[in-house]
Amino acid sequence: APLSSEQLLSLLMQSRRNNAASGITDMLLYGNATFLQVLEGEAAVVDPLVERIGSDPRHAGVKIIGRKTVASRQYSD
């Protein structure tokens, strides 16, 4: 079901806290009850997070569109 503005704000705040504590930066888009997320960080931290997201029953149809190494983070802010 689509998320309310309040639910999205709560998710954003939680994600910012968790990702900052783990050294992950990201970009998260939401539309039509679908998320698109870019995660940036060390593979040793990002890979377990991707596994947790994929095994979380709240998520369905998780797909990795691409993966690459970058010289600098694009979503550090």
Image (spheres, rainbow, N blue to C red):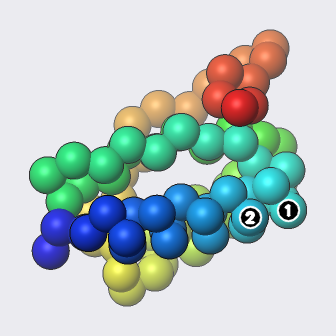
Answer with the quarter of the image where residue 59 lies.
bottom left
Q: Are marks 1 and 2 in contact (CB under 8 Å)?
A: yes
**Residue under the image location 80 percent in, 14 percent down:** 71
Q: CA distance from mark 1 to mark 2?
A: 6 Å
**Is residue 13 shown above or below 35?**
below
Give the number of callouts. 2
Instruction: Answer whether residue 69 is visible to the viewer in this image.
Output: no
Q: Quadrant of the N terminus?
A: bottom left
- Is residue 53 visible from the viewing direction of this image? yes
The disc labelled 2 sits on which kind of residue?
Arg
**Could you tell me which residue is drawn at 46 percent across and 81 percent down?**
56
For label 2, the residue is 17
Amino acid on which the number 1 mark rests in the picture: Ala
Residue at the extreme front: 6
Q: Secondary structure at mark 2?
A: helix
Q: On the picture, is 66 further left or further right than 72? A: left
Rate crowding at label 2 as few (under 14), some (14 to 19) or many (20 or more) other CA atoms within 10 Å: few
24 or 48: which is nearer to us?
Answer: 24
**Residue labelled with disc 1:** 21
